[in-house]
Image (cartoon, grey):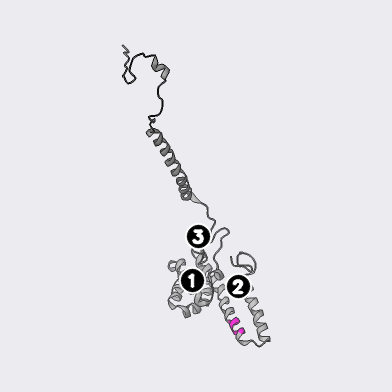
Amino acid sequence: KTCSADGMNDEGTSSVNLRIIDLFSQGQLGLLRRQCSEVDALKNQIINLMAVPLIQSSLYNAHIRNFTSGFEELKGATYAASVLPLIHDCNPEDAETIFASLGLGQSNETMDTVKVKEAFENNYGCLGVTCEDIGGVWEGKYYGQYASPCNYQVEDAKQPLGTLGILVIVCFLLVPMMLAAFFIYFRKRTTRPSPSDNLYDEENLDSFGDVPRNTLMTINLD
């Protein structure tokens, strides 16, 4: 998803192309005004942005190499070869990591998408590009596995809740309800009448005559 001016669409003109065209227009105006120092700065921005599609294509082919082979291997090696000199100037070790997976003649057995992605991301600052510039491999609803933008937070994705999430929510709701029910039941069991409660009917007690109220009475059922 790097199309349109804001880079949030997966169709249309690439955001980086729109930005480069705008920088060329600014550079043309700067040359007409003889603003050489400003034009030089614009030139460097253009060079940095021109590396974006090379990185994107390399990462895309590193991603699909997990599922395909043949012509895709050649494409990935070509794109990687175009950007490897830039990576090497920033970090030779990361360049070696990328070549080990995407270089011409490398087999799928040496392919490591995660390491390739990390090797590129390690050098975004040196190359003058950002995670937003590069984006990720969008597969309709979600980013591909190991192919999301480097600043992408998983919780931002509208993923299905899943069984585990449902169980957590159910437990979260049931535990307080069970504790409340247990508390109410326990309180009823431990509640005793207070001394002030009138447990006897005064009129009925008078029918027993002179029997003391504290006398224990028994009834013979034989």
Camera-nearest residue between 19 and 113: 19
Which numbered circle lies on residue 154? 3
Q: CA distance from mark 2 to mark 3?
A: 25 Å
**How many numbered marks have been drawn onto this rendered protein structure?**
3
Which numbered circle lies on residue 56? none
Q: Closer to us: mark 3 or mark 1?
A: 3
Chain-order first, disc 1 or disc 2? 2
Question: Who's the residue at 42% across and 41% down the image?
Answer: 179
Q: CA distance from mark 1 to mark 2?
A: 18 Å
Which numbered circle lies on residue 121? 1
Q: CA distance from mark 3 to mark 1?
A: 18 Å
Looking at the rendering, which quadrant does residue 211 occupy? Answer: top left
In this picture, is 13 found above or below 35? above
Tell me the amino acid under the disc marked 1: Glu
Which corner quadrant holds the N terminus? bottom right
Which numbered circle lies on residue 16? 2
Span of residues in magenta: 38-43
The local crowd at label 2, few if under 14, some if 14 to 19, many if 20 or more residues have their Cα within 10 Å, is many
Q: Position of residue 152 (x, y in %)?
A: 52, 64
User: Is residue 152 at least partly visible in the picture?
Assistant: yes
Q: Position of residue 22 (x, y in %)?
A: 65, 76
Question: Who's the residue at 41% across and 17% down the image?
Answer: 204
The local crowd at label 1, few if under 14, some if 14 to 19, many if 20 or more residues have their Cα within 10 Å, is many
Looking at the rendering, which quadrant does residue 45 occupy? Answer: bottom right
In this picture, is 42 found above or below 53? below
Helix, strand or loop at mark 1: helix
Chain-order first, disc 3 or disc 1? 1
The local crowd at label 3, few if under 14, some if 14 to 19, many if 20 or more residues have their Cα within 10 Å, is few
Dominant SS in magenta: helix
Question: Who's the residue at 56% across and 62% down the image?
Answer: 138
Helix, strand or loop at mark 2: helix
Which corner quadrant holds the C terminus? top left
